[in-house]
């Protein structure tokens, strides 16, 4: 049983996971486990797929181009984060990666890049950001991996925004004002963070006009967008989330 405890390496797989389930590895996964991490037959790995919790699995076959693991025991139940979207205007690549990583670690259930008037980047690599989210989940012990949506224009974002979902609108124009979440209700939420250039006046007017918008200040100083994302996630989780 002691060897089971050593399944420190966590690997996200698309495969269903259950007692005795065999899981074939992709070439990249085999390279990571057997080439980089130097695991061999008989070693244990923690697998998760975002739906079935975490499973301790034993290496049955280890090869350069593939391999097979078999689920031995469930090591953690599936734990989903609160129904919280982190919506943000993409900024420079490394800092956008940072926002995605923190959103996973801090418990967002969906990550929505929004192209606002002053957003610098015209496009994002959704597949790369999704892989980044998987990596963050592998590292932080999560059993859930949020979807990173495709970049959506602000108009479309507001048009499609569900009427039953509230939005914590982090408005830099409210800097220093005593605008907090207060006794906001539980339920489906989103956090919205603007780009380095902030929200445009027309965007601000539309957001302030949304019934389900809760305008908040993130303190007396202007935060960088990535700092603002972490601050907003912290405030929301402490007030309404699963912390
Ligand atoms: N260019 C803007 C300016 O100088 O006023 C700053 C934008 S800030 C770098 C990026 C985003 O972080 C803002 O759009 C807002 O969503 C959030 N943010 C930063 N500081 C904030 C604060 N004190 N209160 C509310 N939101 C803030």
Image (cartoon, rainbow, N blue to C red):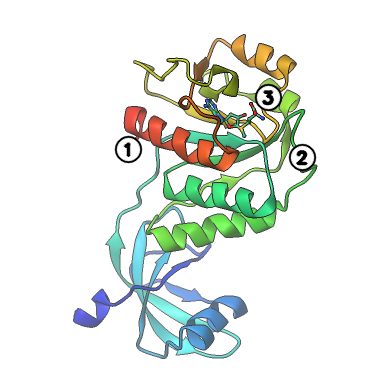
Q: Position of residue 105 (x, y in %)?
A: 43, 50
The mark that comes first in sequence, 3 or 1, is 3
Classed neighbour count for the residue bearing mark 1: other residues with Cα under 10 Å, few (<14), some (14–19), many (≥20): few
Q: Tell me, yes or no, whether the two marked residues, 3 and 1, touch with CB atoms within 8 Å.
A: no
Ligand 1 within 8 angstroms of badge 2 C-beta? no
Say if 39 sits above or below 217 in the image.
below
Q: Is residue 8 left or right of residue 148?
A: left
Residue at disc 3, secondary structure: loop
The quarter of the picture where residue 149 lies is top right
Label 2 element class: loop
**Which residue: 52% across, 47% down?**
146
Residue shown at the point (77%, 43%) measured from the top left:
121
**Is 2 positioned to the left or the right of 80 in the image?**
left
Q: Quadrant of the C terminus?
A: top left
User: What is the C-alpha distance between the residues marked 1 and 2?
Assistant: 33 Å
Judging by the rendered image, the residue that carries numbered circle 1 is 242
152 left or right, relative to 162: right
Which residue, given by chain and number where applicable, does mark 2 sit on?
120
Image x and y of residue 235, in percent: 39, 31
Q: Quadrant of the N terminus?
A: bottom left
Residue farthest to the right, as pictured: 122
Ligand 1 sits in which quadrant?
Answer: top right
Label 2: how many Cα within 10 Å (few below 14, some 14–19, many 20+):
some
Q: Is mark 3 within 8 Å of ligand 1?
A: yes
Label 3, on which residue?
Answer: 199
Q: How far apart are labels 3 and 1 at the CA level?
A: 29 Å
Cα gap from disc 3 to disc 2, whole angstroms? 12 Å
Circle nearer the N terminus (1, 2)? 2
In percent of width and height, residue 240 lies at 35, 28
Res 106 label: none
| Quadrant of res 39 | bottom left
Q: Earlier in the sequence, mark 3 or mark 2?
A: 2
């Amino acid at each position: 049983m002691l060897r089971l405890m050593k399944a420190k390496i966590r690997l996200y797989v698309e495969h269903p996971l259950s007692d005795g389930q065999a899981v074939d590895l992709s070439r990249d996964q085999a390279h990571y486990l057997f080439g980089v991490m130097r695991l061999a037959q008989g070693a244990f790995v923690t697998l998760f797929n975002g739906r079935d919790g975490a499973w301790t699995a034993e290496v049955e076959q280890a090869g350069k181009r593939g391999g097979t693991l078999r689920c031995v025991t469930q090591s953690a139940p599936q734990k989903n984060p609160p129904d919280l979207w982190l919506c943000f205007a993409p900024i420079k690549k490394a800092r956008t990666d940072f926002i995605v990583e923190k959103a996973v670690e801090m418990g967002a259930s969906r990550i929505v890049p929004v192209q606002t008037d002053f957003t610098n980047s015209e496009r994002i690599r959704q597949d790369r950001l999704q892989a980044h989210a998987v990596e963050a989940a592998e590292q932080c012990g999560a059993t859930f991996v949020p979807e990173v949506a495709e970049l959506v224009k602000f108009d479309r974002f507001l048009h499609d925004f569900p009427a039953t979902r509230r939005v914590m609108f982090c408005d830099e124009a409210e800097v220093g004002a005593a605008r907090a979440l207060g006794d906001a209700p539980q339920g489906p939420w989103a956090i919205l963070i603007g780009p380095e250039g902030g929200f445009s006046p027309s965007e601000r007017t539309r957001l302030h006009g949304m019934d389900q918008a809760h305008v908040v200040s993130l303190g007396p100083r202007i935060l960088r967008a990535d700092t603002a994302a972490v601050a907003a996630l912290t405030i929301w989780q402490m007030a309404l989330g699963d912390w």
